[in-house]
Image (cartoon, rainbow, N blue to C red):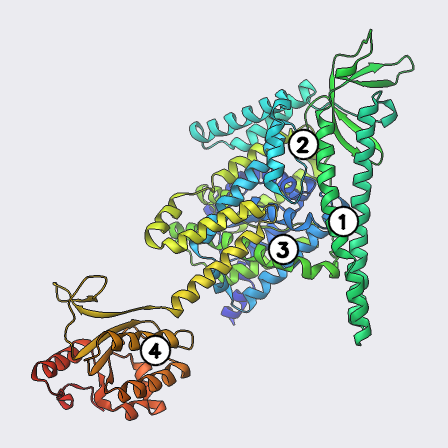
Amino acid sequence: MDSWLYRLLPFLRWFPMSRVGLRADLVAGITVALVLVPQGMAYAQLAGLPVVYGLYASFVPVIIASLWGSSSQLHTGPVAMLSLMSAAALIPFATPGSATFIELSVMLALMVGVLRLALGALSLGAVVNLLSSPVIIGFTNAAALIIGLSQLSKILGVPFPRTESYLADLWRVIEQIPEVHVMTLLFAVGAWLLIAGLRRYRPTLPGVLVAVVIATLLSALIGFEQKLSVDPAQIEDDRVVATLDALANGQERMARITTELADIAHRADVLERESGLSAIASAAQVRSHAPALVYEKAAKRREVTRLTVEMHDWSLRRAPLTDGSSVFYAEDALPDGFEGDGGRWRFAGLTDGQVTLSAGGDVVGVIPRGLPSLRVPAVEWDLVWALLPAALVMALIGFMEATSISKAIATRTGERVDTNKELIGQGLANIAGSFFSSYTVSGSFSRSAVAARTGAKTGLFAIVSALAVVLVLLFFTSYLYHLPQAVLAVIVMMAVFSLIRVKPLIQAWRVDRLGALIGILTFAATLAMAPAIADGILLGIVLTVLHFLIRTMKPRAEIVARKPDGTLGGIRANKLRPMSERFVPVRFDGSLTFINVAYFEDILLEAHADFPKAKKILVVGSGINEIDASGEEKIREVAVRLNKAGVTLVFSGLKHQVRRALEASGLVEELGRTSFFPDKETALRSLLRAADEHREPDDSRTAMPG
């Protein structure tokens, strides 16, 4: 009964709590919260969401994961990689930051949670083994680069429009370096120096929080944010107005296309649910309109990107009018006698026909006060299948992160980590979080490391950190208004660049060059396919499975002979002389199943062709761990074929389960029990003696007893 109760309510293992442990969890929780709040806001923007959704994701999911997870020091919440993957998966279906995008982000969290919960409930945690170490390293390195460099635009203070090609977008940012906003760059550099300096010289201080507080105060004092919302009619330059009109038309058309595509998917789905060939044909006809719209949307996105960058390149000067309003002129076409206010204004956005101009830098802005309300997440069934591949990859990647973090901490604490319980805990966290406006979450390496370093004893520390977020949402959101976006970008960069590791790939190259090459290809593919980075790791998984299949289809098999030290080695690899012309020993190191029986046959026939005088072919079978019906049938066929050529097939060292399967099939009796030796040395002595005497060996004394 107690065992069942502990499985149902795993947090009961925390009790009874000691005063020392309670104090340690309280200190660890407060310390982690100092990192969680700025990280949550930064990662929400990485996910294409308003910063408050990072705080929502740092509340309910944190509590649920700590209660039902298996690791006492694992901290769950927003993480960089899944934030980027969430944004990349949803960008084709909605505009980042829009109400639709937010709903889809919450729905994706629900999907990821259901997948993780199902994997955990079915005890399928081992499915993560599909991700080989080189693939994980290659993907992580590429994702870290993508995430980090995606923040470059915020550090420079230039736009980073999102299109279907991340590398092209990054190049557009680099081209805008001459247009850098100096004050934004200074905030970023200052934050980096402060965080790095405190991390090195005062590691006990929360460097991230210190940087956030100081940067927010400075931003408010100097008036870092300077924004105006103006009507296009206030801009006295036909070139700028024409570009604005084109941009507005492009944005409007993209929004209409998105709506049309959703309508097509819905109508086709309704038709497909009806029975009959006519309904299926009608659905196909409806869907036939989608490819043209998808192509047009991609073209419009490129056009909007070009126009956005072009608008940002314009520098405007403001001239106040006598009635209190203002007009703006392009700096390269100021009228004679122009008297402005001295500021230079640049394009910052276009919404509902109003142009946002900025003379300063970007700040977090208004953060809604209060806790997220309980609401059943909206499920767009038309998009579930489209998002399922990304959701599955996110479920696996997030689970891999959580378990690797848990196991790394467990090596120091001695705590046993149950991967299936962790899957259940992470799944429940995402499901419960989706009912409180949370996007996809997972285990965080940095926050878990802080918890372990500060002496967290139980998952109570995570609940304390979540309660601290509640206090921020209730009382302190207004104080974060002036936090520069560049500082959040630095927090993301410093977090993800620490994940880049090259040494494991070098080590993998020394051990398994093909496996390492797959890791390198995963790295390159993830970069090339960005922002759809899930496709990169899917390619890595496919290549890993193919690599495994090829190795299984062609296991190590070679003709062997004695090396100078007396052991057996391949005659070709070691340039050895054959042991005898009258028999051929062949080592086969692989299970004999349907996938490699053809290769097994080829090896034996090749041995017969190379040694035509041999009367026996010995299969050194100690490496054969299992055999199936195809393997048993192939042995029979090859034995008959060789027997017609005057050659006998014999075996040595077969494992008990393989020998038992051959006996059950009757093959042992057909080939003769004297064809099966207990080990290779017994077989070789017998065959060598027979070769020396030019007669058949006395198998009755050396063969395995019947």
Compute the Cα span from label 4 to label 3: 52 Å
**Pointers 4 and 1 in contact (C-beta within 8 Å):** no
Up/down of 31 relative to 116, above or below: above
**Of 663 and 462, the residue lying toward us:** 663
Circle 4 crowding by C-alpha within 10 Å: few under 14, some 14–19, many from 20: some
Residue wearing tag 4: 601
**Of 428 and 365, the residue lying toward us:** 365
Q: Nearer the viewer, mark 4 or mark 3?
A: 4
Residue wearing tag 2: 159
Residue 661 at x, y percent in the picture: 35, 85
Q: Nearer the viewer, mark 2 or mark 3?
A: 2
Type of amino acid under label 4: Glu
Type of amino acid under label 1: Thr
Label 4, secondary structure: give it.
helix
Q: Earlier in the sequence, mark 2 or mark 3?
A: 2
Q: Earlier in the sequence, mark 3 or mark 1?
A: 1
Residue wearing tag 1: 100
Residue at 79% across / 40% down in the picture?
251
Compute the Cα span from label 4 to label 1: 60 Å
Query: How many circles with numbers are drawn on the protein?
Result: 4
Instruction: Using residue 132 as the reference point, say whether residue 245 is left or right of it.
Output: right
Q: Which mark is residue 425?
A: none
